[in-house]
Image (cartoon, rainbow, N blue to C red):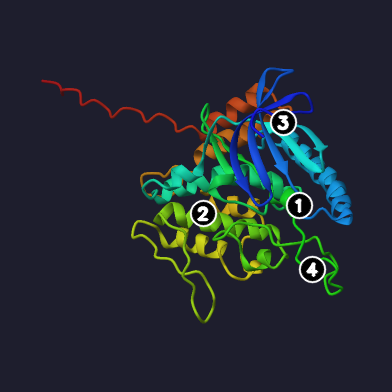
């Protein structure tokens, strides 16, 4: 494929990755002299019925991708889509940077670093969830940190992959939707998603696993034999509060997790508490508030400057007269 020209426009330069759904290439748009990413998606069956369904859903899902990238700057743009020789192609924006795979393979991160990483990922994911769309394949390889500004980009939506895989027995009358399968990556996929029943909370589970991986240096695999909950060892530097957030993210029961990226982002965002200035006796001072609020009210009522001055004088401490000076008595 390297060197091939697709649509008389996209010259394939290098294979970036290969998987069960197809290949991803670095390509040159010879019309615009721009570098692009070309994804080749292959249905795993040449059955005419499968191809017909794949063709229809490919158009639908690529419309979804087009809507997402137009709605959020941290999702790569979709420039083109086409079918050639019963194979389907997406042409997307090339993000110059590195996936989080290498970043997470380094030494474990601190709790503060992991919180920031999760919040960075949750920004584009919140937009996706707000559209009621499930990514389905959250993992380090599908998150790119752009070199120019360190922004995290969300790539490779699993919804498109789903339509290119059919179950082994598509004619099974017990399956009302024979083209729905579990999409995801080993270690990051919750039970309900593996069974073909993903929810928005399935993305939260994958992100929780990623967070624990960043903290500990490895993907947690051990489970409690009684509850099937993931077991992981909390580093001493990690607060109980943050550990509780991670544990809720990876709960085996999807209904007990944070239900959306926005809900999780709120839980991770520090609460800003305003503190009133204290007086010398430790109690909050009310005078500054009165000085500001009462003149503002008078202004709103249209009273004159004399009234304002009067209120200001009322609440402004009067100067204390100096003590009397002892005059010398008559000699």
Q: Nearer the viewer, mark 3 or mark 4?
A: 4
Q: Which residue is mark 4?
A: 169
The kind of secondary structure element at disc 1 is loop
Q: Quadrant of the C terminus?
A: top left
Q: Which residue is mark 2?
A: 210
The kind of secondary structure element at disc 2 is helix
Residue 132 badge: 1
Q: What percent of the width, then of the height, locates residue 48? A: 89, 53
Marks 3 and 4, Cα distance to the nearest angstrom?
Answer: 74 Å
Q: Nearer the viewer, mark 4 or mark 2?
A: 4
Residue 17 is left or right of residue 81, and the answer is left
Mark closer to the chain start, 2 or 1: 1
Q: What percent of the width, then of the height, locates residue 224? A: 49, 76
Q: Nearer the viewer, mark 3 or mark 2?
A: 2
Q: Which residue is mark 3?
A: 300
Circle 4 packing at 10 Å, graded few (<14), some (14-19), many (20+), is few
């Amino acid at each position: 494929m390297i060197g091939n020209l697709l649509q008389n426009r996209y010259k394939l330069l290098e294979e970036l990755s290969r998987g069960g759904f197809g290949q991803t290439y670095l390509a040159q748009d010879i019309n615009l002299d721009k570098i692009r990413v070309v994804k080749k998606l292959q249905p795993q069956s040449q059955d005419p019925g499968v191809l017909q369904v794949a063709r229809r859903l490919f158009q639908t899902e690529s419309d979804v991708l087009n809507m997402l990238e137009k709605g959020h700057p941290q999702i790569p743009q979709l420039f083109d889509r086409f079918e050639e020789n019963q194979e389907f192609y997406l042409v997307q924006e090339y993000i110059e940077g590195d996936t989080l795979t290498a970043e997470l393979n380094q030494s474990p991160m601190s709790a503060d670093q992991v919180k920031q990483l999760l919040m960075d990922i949750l920004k584009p994911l919140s937009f996706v969830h707000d559209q009621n769309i499930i990514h389905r394949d959250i993992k380090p390889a599908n998150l790119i940190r752009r070199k120019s500004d360190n922004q995290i980009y969300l790539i490779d939506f699993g919804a498109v992959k789903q339509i290119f895989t059919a179950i082994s027995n598509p004619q099974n009358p017990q399956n009302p939707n024979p083209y729905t399968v579990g999409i995801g990556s080993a270690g990051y996929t919750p039970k309900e998603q593996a069974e073909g029943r993903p929810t928005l909370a399935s993305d939260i589970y994958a992100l929780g696993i990623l967070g624990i991986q960043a903290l500990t240096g490895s993907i947690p695999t051990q489970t409690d034999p009684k509850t099937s909950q993931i077991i992981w060892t909390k580093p001493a530097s990690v607060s109980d509060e943050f550990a509780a957030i991670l544990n809720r993210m990876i709960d085996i029961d999807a209904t007990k997790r944070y239900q959306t990226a926005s809900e999780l982002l709120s839980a991770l965002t520090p609460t800003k508490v305003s503190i009133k200035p204290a007086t010398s006796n430790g109690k909050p001072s009310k005078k500054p508030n009165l000085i500001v609020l009462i003149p503002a009210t008078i202004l709103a009522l249209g009273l004159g400057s004399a009234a304002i001055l009067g209120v200001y004088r009322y609440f402004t401490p009067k100067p204390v007269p100096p003590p009397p000076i002892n005059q010398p008595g008559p000699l």
